[in-house]
């Protein structure tokens, strides 16, 4: 069997990561260049002249025009965190370079922080990934499938009506040779034509050719897309070329989640866990750029408090940074 060049990429080695982001000063410089690529700009008046100073070890800039003081983290996802920037960057490295998902418990052990701090850090980074994936639109040939995250609870509702299950849609874009390029994984309110029509409008370009199984709600694709229903049942349908890759991606997703987590709030947090898997899958061709890419998404995502992170669940149409 020929070597899979995507799987056997060297990626960003730990020594190379530490050489680039091993000190707090290096991390501060990386964040500053992403926030102000053309030099400091006052967030209040946009003036480009400022006096730099430190307070309790934290870098600040004071605008020479309006005297507004801006910190390096203000207005970013890292604003309310007391963790060093090098801890944030190391967490990005661990989440990005891992072939499967990394749990908050594993982050706690690697980073030497408390479990609550690791949980906040992981969910904030997953929120940045979710924001980064929101604009993605699939085109060319798109394979669709439906699935659920979670299982039944003792004493709860059985089957698809379980309150611990979250319906979601997974889609994979393939090229002319049938090779997978990008994926989208999003929760939906339910498998209804209205819900699927809204999701298709946000995720799939009108010129795309859509392939799906016989789920009635997928008929919504016929309104704006060339839609083909793949006939068959069980293994034969899963192995059909027109649905092969979406089933492979779905299988890998479930295996990755089962291997990394004993349990999590499927209904509340499914959107973020799906976004984490999709974000990493869509950047698998260039593993050396995963840390800078996630750092950029983190810098451009608004602050999220723990109360907001633990708030009511959102669907793709509501989630934003």
Image: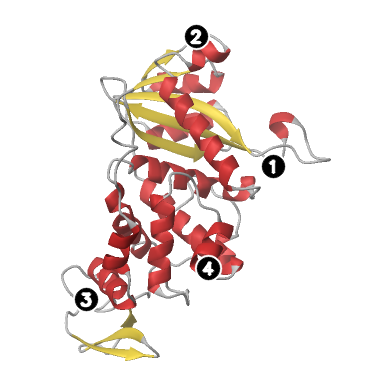
Quote the CA–CA distance across marks 4 and 3.
25 Å
In front of the other: label 2 or label 3?
Answer: 2
Q: Name the residue that disc number 1 marks.
A: 164
Under circle 3, the secondary element is loop
Of the pair 290 and 246, the residue shown nearer to us: 290
Give the mark nearest the N terminus, 2 or 1. Answer: 1
Crowding at dot 2, Cα within 10 Å, few <14 / some 14-19 / many 20+, comes out as: few
Give the mark nearest the N terminus, 4 or 2. Answer: 2
Name the quadrant containing residue 28. Answer: bottom left
Of the pair 225 and 106, the residue shown nearer to us: 106
Under circle 1, the secondary element is loop
Q: Is residue 38 above or below residue 196?
A: below
**Image-based side of 152 in relation to 294, left or right:** right
Q: Name the residue that disc number 3 marks.
A: 41
Of the pair 50 and 274, the residue shown nearer to us: 274
Name the quadrant containing residue 199. Answer: top left
Under circle 2, the secondary element is loop
Q: Residue 138: horizontal and vertical position, in percent?
A: 34, 33
Give the mark nearest the N terminus, 4 or 1. Answer: 1
Callout 4 touching callout 3 (CB < 8 Å): no
Indicate the quadrant containing the C terminus: top left, top right, bottom left or bottom right: bottom left
User: What residue is rendered at 25% in x and 20% in y?
Assistant: 176
Crowding at dot 3, Cα within 10 Å, few <14 / some 14-19 / many 20+, comes out as: some
Q: Residue 232: horizontal and vertical position, in percent?
A: 53, 8
Q: Residue 43: horizontal and vertical position, in percent?
A: 28, 76
Q: Name the residue that disc number 4 marks.
A: 305
Give the mark nearest the N terminus, 3 or 1. Answer: 3
Give the mark nearest the N terminus, 4 or 3. Answer: 3
In front of the other: label 3 or label 1?
Answer: 1
Q: Name the residue that disc number 2 marks.
A: 231
Of the pair 133 and 110, the residue shown nearer to us: 110
């Amino acid at each position: 069997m020929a070597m899979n060049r995507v799987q056997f990429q060297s990626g960003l080695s730990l020594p190379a990561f530490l050489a680039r982001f091993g000190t707090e000063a290096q991390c501060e410089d990386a964040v500053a260049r992403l926030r102000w690529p053309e030099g400091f700009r006052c967030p209040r008046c946009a003036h480009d002249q400022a006096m730099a100073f430190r307070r309790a070890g934290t870098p600040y800039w004071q605008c020479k025009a309006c005297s507004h003081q801006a910190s390096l983290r203000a207005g970013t996802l890292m604003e309310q965190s007391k963790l060093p920037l090098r801890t944030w960057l190391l967490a990005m490295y661990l989440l990005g370079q891992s072939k499967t998902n990394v749990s908050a418990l594993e982050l706690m052990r690697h980073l030497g922080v408390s479990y609550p701090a690791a949980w906040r850090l992981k969910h904030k980074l997953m929120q940045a990934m979710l924001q980064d994936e929101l604009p993605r639109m699939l085109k060319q040939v798109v394979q669709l499938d439906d699935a659920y995250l979670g299982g039944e609870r003792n004493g709860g509702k059985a089957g698809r009506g379980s309150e611990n299950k979250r319906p979601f849609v997974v889609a994979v874009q393939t090229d002319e040779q049938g090779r997978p390029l990008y994926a989208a994984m999003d929760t939906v309110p339910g498998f209804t034509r209205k819900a699927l029509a809204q999701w298709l409008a946000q995720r799939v370009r009108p010129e795309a050719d859509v392939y799906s199984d016989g789920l009635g709600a997928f008929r919504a694709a016929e309104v704006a897309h060339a839609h083909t229903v793949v006939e068959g049942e069980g293994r034969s349908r899963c192995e059909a070329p027109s649905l092969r890759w979406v089933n492979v991606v779905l299988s890998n997703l479930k295996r990755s989640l089962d291997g990394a987590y004993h349990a999590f709030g499927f209904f509340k947090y499914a959107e973020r866990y799906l976004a984490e898997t999709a974000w990493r899958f869509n950047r698998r061709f260039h593993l050396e750029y995963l840390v800078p890419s996630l750092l950029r998404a983190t810098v451009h995502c608004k602050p999220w408090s723990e109360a907001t992170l633990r708030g009511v669940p959102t669907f793709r149409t509501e989630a934003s940074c």
